[in-house]
Amino acid sequence: MTTSPALHGPKSWAIQPNRPLRLTVAEIHDLAGDVRRMVLASTDGARLSSFTPGSHLLIRWASRRYNAYSLTGPLFEPDFYVIAVRARYDGLGGSAYVHNLSVGDEIVALGPRSSFAPVLDAKHHVLVAGGIGVTPILSHARSHVAMGRSFEVHFGTRDDALVGELIEVAGDAVNIYRTRAEMGAAIDDRLREQRIGAHLYLCGPAAMAASVRGLAQEAHWPAGRIHEEVFSAEVLDPGEAFCVELPGGRRIEVPRGVSMLAALESVGIAVPNMCRRGYCGECITAVRSGELVHRDSILRPSERDGNDRLTPCVSRGRGVVQIELQTERT
Amino acid sequence: MPDASHYYVITVGADAQVSSLRFASTAATVSASTFEHLDSASISALAVLAGDAFVGSHFAIIGAEADVYAVAAILGASGVMREEMSVVAMDHDSEPQQGILWSSADSRRRVFCAHCHETFETTAGPTHTVLCAHCDNSLTIDPYFSRVRAAYLGTYTP
C-alpha cells in the first residue's frame, strides 16, 4: 500500500494551536514592580503563527500545569513572542517558574489562543488597564496603530513597568494614572463622551474592573459594548463543602477550599484541564442534577441556565451534584 | 424600554406618530429625548442622527415593517447595536417568531433580488412570485429575511 507523502508531517505554515510549541528564552528584561519581560524564539526554527490582539500563550510550568500569559509583542508573522509576567509570591508557582528562567532555557507552550479579541467594526476602542493587566491592552494598541483604527488607552499603575513600551506603541493616545480616584474620574468623563459605535475593553484587578464596569453601566453602556479579560490572579472564595456523585453512584467529598477538579484528581479521576482558573473551558463537565455555583468566566448565561454543565476547576455545588464523566470542549 | 441616558423615538408614517405617544411618556422620564418623524423616503438621513448619538442612547423605531427594519439596518451600519434598539412593526398580524413580528402577506415588503442584487419594495408575501423592479426577472419571495439588508430574499424562478 502506498500513501501520499503530502499527508505526512505538519506543513510548516499550518497553524496547530494544540501542538506544543518549543520556545527558547532569547532575552530577559527585568522591569519595575517585579515584572519580567521575556522574549521567546522558536527552538526548532518553525515559523511562529500570527495572532489576534488580546491572545495569550499557555506556558507549561509543571507536568500538565499551564499558566496563560498575554502576548505583548508584534502580532503579524512575528519572529518572536513576548510576554510580561509579574512575580506573585502567593501564586501556585507559574510566575515563579517564569522568574527562574535564564536566557537559553527551553520551555513548552500551547497557543496562541484568542479570548479577548477587539470588535473590528467598532468606531472607537476605549482600552482600560490596571497594573499587569496592561499586557493584552498592549497588543490591542499595537494592532489599532498598525491598522489605523481609532482608540485611546487609560492605564492605572503604581510603577513604571511597561509604561514606556505602551507610550512607544500608542503615543498620545495613552493616559497614565497613579491613583484609582484620578483614573475613575477621568474614565467616568470619557465614558459619557463616547459616540455610538465605541467599545470598552477592560483588563486589571477585580476591584478596578468592577469599578470601571460600574461606571459604564451607570452611563447606560449596554453589556455588548463592554469586554473584559479575565485577570486570573484573583484568589477565589474557598466556598462550602459539597459532594459529587459519579455515574455509578460513588460519592466524592469536595471540602471547603479544595476545587472539585482537585478532589476528583485526588481519587484518581482524570478530567482534561488546562488553565484551572475557569476561563479555558477545557474541564467543562456534564451535570445530571444538582444545584450549581458557577464561578467560571467561560460559560454563557444561556449555558448556565441549562444547569447541565459546570467548570470543576473553579465552580462548585450545594449538597449533592451528580455528574457525567464525559467532558466536552468549547 | 431599557434605561438610557437619551431616547431617540423614530417614527415613520402617520400611524406610527400616534403610537409613539406611549413611548413619549417613558422617554419623558429621562432628561433628554429626541423625536424624529420621517417619511419612507427620508430614512437614509438617520445615519447623521446616529453618528451624533452617544453611547447610552436607546432608539425606539415605530412604523410599518418595511420601514422599521430599514431604519434598524441604517442605525446598525452606523454602529448601533441590536440591544440599543426597540423595534415596533405596526402592520403585523402574527405572533412573534424568533422575537420578530412579521407583517401580513398584503403588506409592503422590501425584497432583495438575488439575480441583480438590487432591493425594491413590493406588496406581496413570502412564497409569492413577483417581478424584480430592476431586472424584470421573475422572483419568488423567500421567507429568509436579512436584517443587514432589511429585505426578504427574492430568488430567480424561471
Image (cartoon, helix red, strand yellow):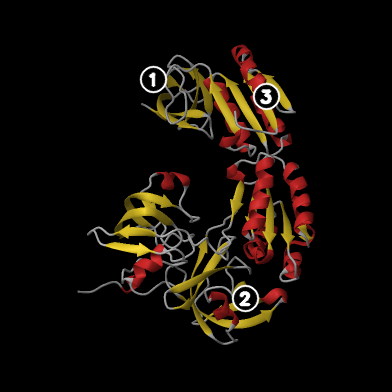
Quadrant the C terminus of chain A occupies: bottom left
Instruction: Kindly identify which chain the residue marked by label 3 belongs to.
Output: B
Q: At x 68% / y 76%, what residue is drawn?
A: A34
Tell me if mark 2 has few (under 14), some (14-19) or many (20+) residues whose alpha carbon lies within 10 angstroms of its own.
Answer: some
- Tell me where residue B111 appears, x and y as whole percent: 49, 26
Tell me if mark 1 has few (under 14), some (14-19) or many (20+) residues whose alpha carbon lies within 10 angstroms of its own.
Answer: few
**Labels 3 and 1: the sequence-earlier one:** 3
Amino acid carrying label 2: it is: Ala
Name the residue tied to disc 3.
B27
Name the residue tied to disc 2.
A87
Q: Secondary structure at mark 2?
A: loop
Q: How far, Cα to Cα, is label 2 from label 3?
A: 51 Å
Amino acid carrying label 3: it is: Ala
Instruction: Kindly identify which chain the residue marked by label 1 belongs to.
Output: B
* For residue B80, above or below residue A180: above
- Tell me where residue A176 appears, x and y as whole percent: 78, 61
Q: At x 57% / y 36%, what residue is drawn?
A: B83
* For residue B53, above or below residue B132: below
Tag shown at residue B30: none
Residue extending farthest left: A1
Q: Is circle 1 on the same chain as circle 2?
A: no
Pick the front one: A306 or A127: A306
Instruction: Kindly identify which chain the residue marked by label 2 belongs to.
Output: A
Q: How far, Cα to Cα, is label 1 from label 2?
A: 68 Å
Name the residue tied to disc 1.
B128
- Tell me where residue B128 appears, x and y as whole percent: 39, 20
* For residue A224, above or below residue B30: below
Q: At x 53% / y 17%, what residue is drawn?
A: B90
- Tell me where residue A285 appears, x and y as whole percent: 36, 57
